[in-house]
Image: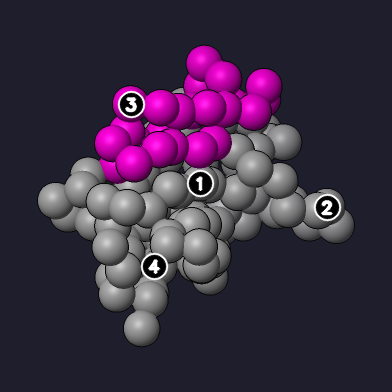
Amino acid sequence: QVQLVESGGGWVQSGGSLRLSCAASGLSFSEAVMSWYRQAPGQEREMVAHIGFTGDATSYEPFAQGRFTISRDNIKNTFYLRMTDLKPEDTAVYFCRVLALGSNYWGKGTLVAVSS
């Protein structure tokens, strides 16, 4: 059974930093493509960043470029989202998503709240 468990969310002041983690189990981690998404209150879920199998290929949405860094550890079966210079508009529930061998999995999310 595939499980994705996010952690690392919380409350932070504007300009602060957080590192989110997504621990995966029950799948072939090294063959999985991973993404972070977020969903703000009343908004649709949107992609934040994406990382390929080895971690060499990454992509970011414009709002994340230069402030967020996605990474993965294929030994710990965990991937990360380092977020810096956080803004109130970054407030959202952040989800990890894994695409592995044609199947799609989502974590339950972790809340990030940024105060001004």
Nearest the viewer among 110 and 72 is 72
Residue found at the very far bottom of the displayed protein? 1
- The residue that disc 2 covers is 43
Residue 5, numbered label: 4
Does 93 appear above or below 58?
A: below
Distance in Å between CA atoms under marks 2 and 3: 31 Å
Does 78 appear above or below 53?
A: below
Residue found at the very far top of the displayed protein? 66
Between circles 2 and 3, the one closer to the viewer is: 3
Which residues lie in the magenta part?
49-72
Tell me whether circle 2 and circle 1 mark residues in contact (CB < 8 Å).
no
Distance in Å between CA atoms under marks 4 and 3: 23 Å
Residue found at the very far right of the displayed protein? 42
Does the stretch in magenta take in 46?
A: no
> Residue 82 location in percent, x, y?
40, 34
Q: Quadrant of the C terminus?
A: top right
User: In the image, what residue occupies the spot 28% across and 36% down?
Assistant: 54
- Label 3: how many Cα within 10 Å (few below 14, some 14–19, many 20+): few
